[in-house]
DNA sequence: TTTATAGGTCAATATTATTGACTTACATCC
DNA sequence: GGATGTAAGTCAATAATATTGACCTATAAA
């Protein structure tokens, strides 16, 4: 009896997480789609923003895709003037990736919608709830 | 200055949500992959479990895919003995979907890993934190 | 100078989705 | 009862996106 109730609560929590994540990813997806960009482009923008000067090989490792799969989206981003690809000074074989101003602006827009959403929700919930939420999500990442 | 700090906190929250969601979906993905099943199969199992007797058309609406895209995965699930597809008694054109015992067992296994993870995390965090988490995730689904 | 590495490309293939056109079976309406 | 509509399923063509494998250039390092 009690267990079934708890099970129902946990199922609700599953749905909550699913829908919250969808609501969270929908705004960036819409912005990207309007530019003809997809998830791969987003991930590239994201990682290059957080690791300016990173190389193509490093990006391949982080994204876990093949060189051929990365090539097309990355070229599109460079051609669209969103990402800089400069040969290295020490090792001229490597290409160092960074965001252009336009790329940084787009990345800020994408992250910005998500930060605004979180800020709104955190503000409504109060600082204690935010702390509890962070602790819980952290445990979810590294349970045990 | 203060704003930049807050921005960094919100960026952390973005990463937290991303990684928590990945940790949350990884175990079912592994179980499904071992059976040669993908996300579509999972979603079918999920919705059929929650709406036993639902029809193909209803499922198409919920999943938001084309009839042709659903056909192959659904047929695989039926052939694998995980989903029942019975003609309706009132309207014999329609097929009513439900899980077989094996299908229900698999669905329980998939949901079970997620419920166990949530229960573990909720228990560690305490009931107050769980309540705060639920409220916050609910607001994320329907902000405003 | 040989060998290894970073990046890039071409080709073939696989998966998974799409739309459109069509068929079968059945229901419903007049 | 006959026209029309609907549920399900299928065939074909197409598109997007991924894969592996082979190969190339340029450059670095042993």
Image (cartoon, coloured by chain):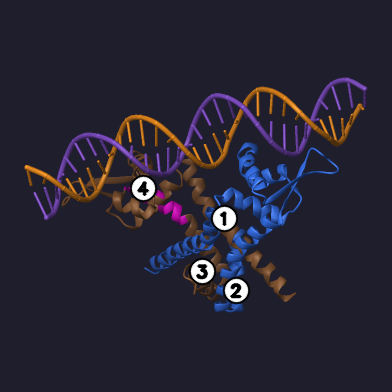
Chain colours: A brown, B blue, C orange, D purple
Q: CB under 8 Å between callouts 2 and 4?
A: no
- The chain under label 4 reads A
B83 to C22, vertically: above or below:
below
Quadrant (top left, top right, bottom left, bottom right) of the C terminus of chain B: bottom right
Which residue is at 65% across, 38% downward?
B67
Q: CB under 8 Å between callouts 1 and 2?
A: no
Q: Which mark is residue A140?
A: 3
- Horizontally, residue B5 falls left or right of residue A15, namely left
From the image, tell me which residue sits under label 4: A103
Q: Quadrant of residue C12?
A: top left
Report the front residue among B86 and A144: B86
Which residue is at 73% across, 54% downward?
B51
Residue B144 visible in the shown view = no
Any magenta on residue A83? no
Label count reads: 4
| C-alpha gap between disc 2 and disc 3 | 12 Å
Q: Which mark is residue B130?
A: 2
- Horizontally, residue D22 falls left or right of residue A41, namely left
Q: Residues within 10 Å of mark 4 (few under 14, many from 20)?
A: many
Which of the two discs, 2 and 4, sits closer to the camera?
A: 2
- The chain under label 1 reads A
Residue C5 drawn at (x, y percent): 22, 50
1 or 3: tag closer to the N-terminus: 1
Report the front residue among A137 and B23: B23
Which of the two discs, 1 and 2, sits closer to the camera?
A: 2
Q: What residue range appears in magenta?
A: A100-112
- The chain under label 3 reads A
Which residue is at 44% across, 52% downward?
A109
From the image, tell me which residue sits under label 1: A23
| C-alpha gap between disc 3 and disc 4 | 32 Å
Which of the two discs, 2 and 3, sits closer to the camera?
A: 3
A45 to B115, vertically: above or below:
above
């Amino acid at each position: 009896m009690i267990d079934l109730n708890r099970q129902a609560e946990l199922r609700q929590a599953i749905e909550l997480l699913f829908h919250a994540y969808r609501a969270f990813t929908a705004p960036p997806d819409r912005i990207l789609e309007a530019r003809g960009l997809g998830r791969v482009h987003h991930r590239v923008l994201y990682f290059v923003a957080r690791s300016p000067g990173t190389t193509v090989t490093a990006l391949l490792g982080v994204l876990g895709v093949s060189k051929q799969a990365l090539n097309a989206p990355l070229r599109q981003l460079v051609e669209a003037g969103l990402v800089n690809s400069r040969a290295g000074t020490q090792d001229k074989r490597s290409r160092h990736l960074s965001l252009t101003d336009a790329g940084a602006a787009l990345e800020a827009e994408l992250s910005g919608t998500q930060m605004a959403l979180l800020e709104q929700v955190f503000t409504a919930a109060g600082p204690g709830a935010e702390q509890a939420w962070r602790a819980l999500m952290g445990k979810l990442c590294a349970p045990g």
